[in-house]
Amino acid sequence: MSAEAFITVPLQCAAHGRTGDKGDRSNISVIAWHPALFPLLVAQITEAAVARQFAHRRPQRVQRFLLPNLHAMNFVLDGVLDGGVNDALNLDSHGKALSFLLLELPLQIPADLVPLLKNLNPTETTR
């Protein structure tokens, strides 16, 4: 496929997320909206990409666990919650909202898979 056959969209168009926290650790699940989108997530939403997205929170470690039967992956980020809910001076040290930050990552989608996307805003896509 040529480069023109791809568009770039926010990850939220191809997947949804769930987040939890325990102490200073956050886990973020990314679940493909459609099974055909999962290989793109695996290829592009890597530990390194997630670490870059959360660089301002200085994660000590980012781990990715694939759940292919669910068309999902789970990321565990250590040291991103300012010590955790009970230890942080930050009023919003919960990890519950971190999935929204992850879902902003850009994702390249082949044009033939665009019909599988959700919440696609034409102003957010680039060719």
Image (cartoon, rainbow, N blue to C red):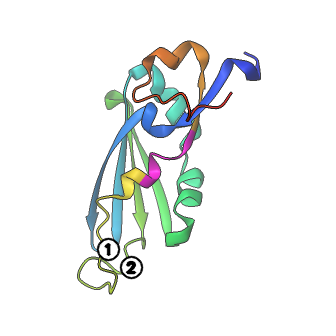
Report, in whole angstroms, how far the alpha carbon at label 1 lies from the one at label 2: 6 Å
Looking at the image, is mark 1 or mark 2 earlier in the sequence?
2
Magenta stretch in the rendered image: 101-106
The reply to whether the C-beta atoms of the residues labelled 1 and 2 are less than 8 Å apart is yes
Q: Residue at x 57, y 12 (%)?
A: 112
Residue 59 picture location, percent across and down: 49, 69
Helix, strand or loop for disc 1: loop
Query: Which residue type does callout 2 highlight?
Result: Asp
Query: Dot 2 lies on which element?
Result: loop
Q: Quadrant location of the N terminus?
A: top right
Q: Is residue 19 above or below residue 80?
A: above
Residue lying at 44% horizontally and 45% vertically, measured from the top left: 103
The answer to whether 121 appears left or right of 2 in the picture is left
Question: Can you give x and y, in whole percent of width and height, for residue 6 in the image?
Answer: 66, 23
| Above or below, comparing residue 58 to residue 66 in the picture | below
Q: What residue is disc 2 on?
A: 82
Q: Please give the residue where the numbered disc 1 appears in the rendered image.
A: 93
